């Protein structure tokens, strides 16, 4: 039986590196993305070069109907061993200026998407009595960040959801954990004032997507695993 990892939001940045790392660890990849077909195809080529398969699945995680249509029959036929929920967007603004669309779009993708995907996949995992679920949250969801009330709310919500889910499914040998990256060098952090950020980070550097992927890989592959319902900060000491 194939070991399959479902990477939700895997075409760029952190998700891209997680997909490659898990492929190197022996997983075939189901990679979901919304609309960047060129980036997704590039990741697929990299994974296939490693000798693993990569199925590309394009849909909007914020839509329950699209999620069910994209994943429902697929997971009934073959349950993934691993689910990594990495879908996320940011629409930063001070709350006093934040529009309803800026609030709704972030909550619907980052938080509603987790419900849509996980509910669709979970029953198949429960039948198999095994699985690893890793949710990619953020330091902003742990400590809050000015100008990111919507983003912080969504990422904090993911932490609460994952901890509650961990209590529900642990007895069925499904491990659920959260990683909370800090400032990671991706397109989302381009343009940030590094001269102001670096003094706040004891390691004095931004993180790389590989820094996150290595922790996710450990949570998904380590056989001797007693980490469950935990939030692991990957932030260079920014939040202690």
Image: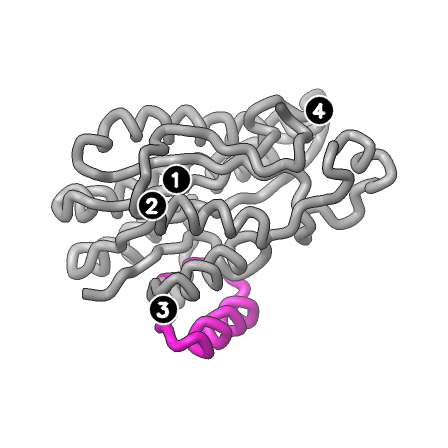
Instruction: Compute the Cα span from label 2 to label 3.
Output: 16 Å
Check disc 4 and report the residue beneath it: 146
Q: In which quarter of the image is the C terminus?
A: top right
Above or below for 207 versus 158: below
- Residue 202: give x, y in percent of width and height: 74, 32
For label 2, the SS is: helix
Point out the residue furthest to the front here.
224
Tag 4 near tag 1, CB within 8 Å: no
Image position, residue 109 (x, y; %): 48, 42
Q: What element carries label 3?
A: strand
Q: Earlier in the sequence, mark 2 or mark 3?
A: 3
Disc 4 or 1, which lies upstream in sequence? Answer: 1
Callout 1 crowding tier (Cα within 10 Å): few <14, some 14–19, many ≥20: many
Question: For the residues marked 3 and 4, what is the alpha-carbon distance in whole angstroms?
Answer: 38 Å
Quadrant in the picture for the N terminus: bottom left
Which residue shows up at 51% across the image and 69% down it? 43
**According to the image, label 2 marks what residue?**
117
Q: In which quarter of the image is residue 97?
A: top right
* Residue 34 appearing in the image: no
> In the rendered structure, which disc, 3 or 1, sits on the residue that comes first in sequence?
3
Q: Residue at x 61, y 22 (%)?
A: 143
The part of the chain drawn in magenta is 30-53
| Residue 150 within the segment the image draws in magenta | no
**Residue 7, picture quadrant:** bottom left
């Amino acid at each position: 039986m194939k070991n399959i990892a479902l990477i939700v939001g895997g075409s760029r940045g952190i998700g891209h590196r997680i997909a490659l790392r898990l492929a190197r660890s022996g997983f075939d990849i189901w990679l979901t993305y919304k609309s960047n077909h060129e980036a997704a195809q590039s990741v697929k080529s990299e994974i296939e070069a490693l000798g693993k398969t990569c199925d590309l699945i394009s849909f909007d995680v914020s839509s329950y109907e699209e999620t069910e249509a994209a994943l429902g029959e697929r997971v009934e036929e073959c349950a993934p061993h691993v689910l990594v929920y990495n879908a996320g967007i940011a629409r930063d603004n001070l709350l006093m200026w934040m529009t309803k669309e800026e609030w709704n779009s972030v909550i619907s993708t980052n938080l509603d998407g987790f419900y849509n995907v996980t509910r669709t996949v979970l029953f198949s995992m429960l039948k198999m009595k095994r699985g690893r679920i890793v949710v990619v949250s953020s330091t902003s969801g742990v400590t809050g960040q000015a100008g990111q009330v919507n983003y912080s709310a969504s990422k904090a919500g993911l932490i609460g959801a994952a901890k509650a889910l961990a209590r529900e499914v642990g007895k069925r040998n499904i491990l659920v954990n959260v990683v909370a990256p800090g400032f990671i060098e991706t397109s989302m952090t381009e343009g940030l004032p590094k001269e102001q950020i670096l003094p706040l980070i004891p390691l004095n550097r931004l993180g790389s997507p590989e820094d996150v992927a290595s922790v996710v890989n450990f949570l998904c592959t380590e056989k001797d695993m007693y980490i469950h319902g935990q939030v692991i900060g990957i932030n260079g000491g920014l939040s202690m």
